[in-house]
Image (tube, rainbow, N blue to C red):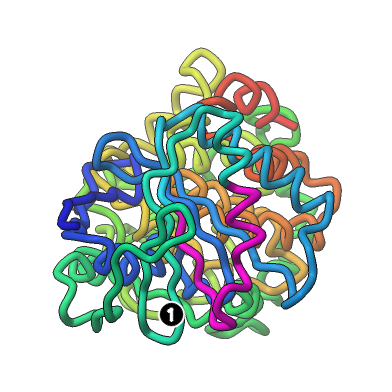
């Protein structure tokens, strides 16, 4: 069978389209779609025509063990959500034990039949080979090609992304550190202890920032995001230390300096600034103009430029750098920002891990609670627009 499929990872701007010529190409591209190699997994690719999305993945139970009732319920919820957005799907079983995936495949097909979801192909991937199965019989098979032989891989590489070795590596990546954590921590402690900042002009409930701090906050965030941004005028927004900013500067393309990290993290403690920054990162949750101070909105646009010209994947990468540059106890808001970027880009594995870790650090963080509930319910971002607009101030 020779058929072309395409997958665009995120809706924030016209992303590069990765094309698969056939099933073998798709097998190689699946780790790039997921962000990690899916060992011992079932992967379901939703199809609308020849376009892929959404993508679901499940761990296979241990050899010889049946699916638990909880796993069956989760499978049914996910497949129900998928069926609302696409009429067909392909099922890939990455099963090095050979045949162990049969029980899950059967359950998938039963659920799909109830939902009137057309499973157009079922493919078993084992020991470097793939087998296309129809009614229990192998009708086509072949060798899994090398990445260098699959042109679609190049589109993901252009974005600077490569799949991790396994899903567990996501959690390891989110807990890693870079930069001068001790210096950043000292600056954050100084800011939290500076009572004068708490008596300044508030832009909304929970506001911490004085008017003159707003420019420095947005300038710090511009430095965090600089490699992901197209050329955008800063209109005089200052650096965190009060000097003029041209949007570039020492350290922009490498590790973040402690002052930039401290100001960027501190800015997220002000709910109005947090809402505007997160609303720019993920336009689905942009607070309406009438509910956002004009000065804050104007400074954000002048600092960052138009959101629709920026790669969602590049924003993910910059939020990851900020996460790793932030002291662990202060990471919850940054992890939430990373989670909302990843969710918008379709990277639900990274989104879920980031939001779970945010809540482990700060269990009452309402925005992380809201987003994690949506991710676990397999809701696409736009379905939560009204709820999120209400909850962002919480």
The location of residue 90, given as percent across then percent down, is 41, 50
Which residue is nearer to you in this view: 94 or 164?
Answer: 94
When asked about the image quadrant of residue 307, the answer is: top left
Q: Quadrant of the N terminus?
A: bottom left
Q: Residues within 10 Å of mark 1 (few under 14, many from 20)?
A: some
Which residue is nearer to you in this view: 299 or 143?
Answer: 143
- Left or right, 243 with reference to 39: left
Determine whether 297 is above or below 108 in the image. Answer: above
The location of residue 320, given as percent across then percent down, is 50, 67
Determine whether 222 is above or below 85 in the image. Answer: below
Residue at 78% of width from left, 46% of height from top? 365
Which residue is nearer to you in this view: 209 or 255?
Answer: 255
Q: Quadrant of the C terminus?
A: top right
Residue at 67% of width from left, 84% of height from top? 182
Callout 1 secondary element:
loop
Determine whether 336 is above or below 131 in the image. Answer: above
Looking at this view, name the residue that lies furthest to the top.
290
Residue 189 is at least partly visible in this image: yes
| Residue 107 in magenta stretch | yes
Give the magenta part as a residue range. Answer: 91-108
Residue at 32% of width from left, 58% of height from top? 244
The location of residue 85, given as percent across then percent down, is 45, 30
Residue 325 is at least partly visible in this image: no
Q: Which residue is mark 1?
A: 255
The location of residue 29, given as percent across then percent down, is 32, 66
| Residue 226 in magenta stretch | no
Residue at 38% of width from left, 55% of height from top? 222
- Left or right, 137 with reference to 155: right
Determine whether 198 is above or below 125 in the image. Answer: above
């Amino acid at each position: 069978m020779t058929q072309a499929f395409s997958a665009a990872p995120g809706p924030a701007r016209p992303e590069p389209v990765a094309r698969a010529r056939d099933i073998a190409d798709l097998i190689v591209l699946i780790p790039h779609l997921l962000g990690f190699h899916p060992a011992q997994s079932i992967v379901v690719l939703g199809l609308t025509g020849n376009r892929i999305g959404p993508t679901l993945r499940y761990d296979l139970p241990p050899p010889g063990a049946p699916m638990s009732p909880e796993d069956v319920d989760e499978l049914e919820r996910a497949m129900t959500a998928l069926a609302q957005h696409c009429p067909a799907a392909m099922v890939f079983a990455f099963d090095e034990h050979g045949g162990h995936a049969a029980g899950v495949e059967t359950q998938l097909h039963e659920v799909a039949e109830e939902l009137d979801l057309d499973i157009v192909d079922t493919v078993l991937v084992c020991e470097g080979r793939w087998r296309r199965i129809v009614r229990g019989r192998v009708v086509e098979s072949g060798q899994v090609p090398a990445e260098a032989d699959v042109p679609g891989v190049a589109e993901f590489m252009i974005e600077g992304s490569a799949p991790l070795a396994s899903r567990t590596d996501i959690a390891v990546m989110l807990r890693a550190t870079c930069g001068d954590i001790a210096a950043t921590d000292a600056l954050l402690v100084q800011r939290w202890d500076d009572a004068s900042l708490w008596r300044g002009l508030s832009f909304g409930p929970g506001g911490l920032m004085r008017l003159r701090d707003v420019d420095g906050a947005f300038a710090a965030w511009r430095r965090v995001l600089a490699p992901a941004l197209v050329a955008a005028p800063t209109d005089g927004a200052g650096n965190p230390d009060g000097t003029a900013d041209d949007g570039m500067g020492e350290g922009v393309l490498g590790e973040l300096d402690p002052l930039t990290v401290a100001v960027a993290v501190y800015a997220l403690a002000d709910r109005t600034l947090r809402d505007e920054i997160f609303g720019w990162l993920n336009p689905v949750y942009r607070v309406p103009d009438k509910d956002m101070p004009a000065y804050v909105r104007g400074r954000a646009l002048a600092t960052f430029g138009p959101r629709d010209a920026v790669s969602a994947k590049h924003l993910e990468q910059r939020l990851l750098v900020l996460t790793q540059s932030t002291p662990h106890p202060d990471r919850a808001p940054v992890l939430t920002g990373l989670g909302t970027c990843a969710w918008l880009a379709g990277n639900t594995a990274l989104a879920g891990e980031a939001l779970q870790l945010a809540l482990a650090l700060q269990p009452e963080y309402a925005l992380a609670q809201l987003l994690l509930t949506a991710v676990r319910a397999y809701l696409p971002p736009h379905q939560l627009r009204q709820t999120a607009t209400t909850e962002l101030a919480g």
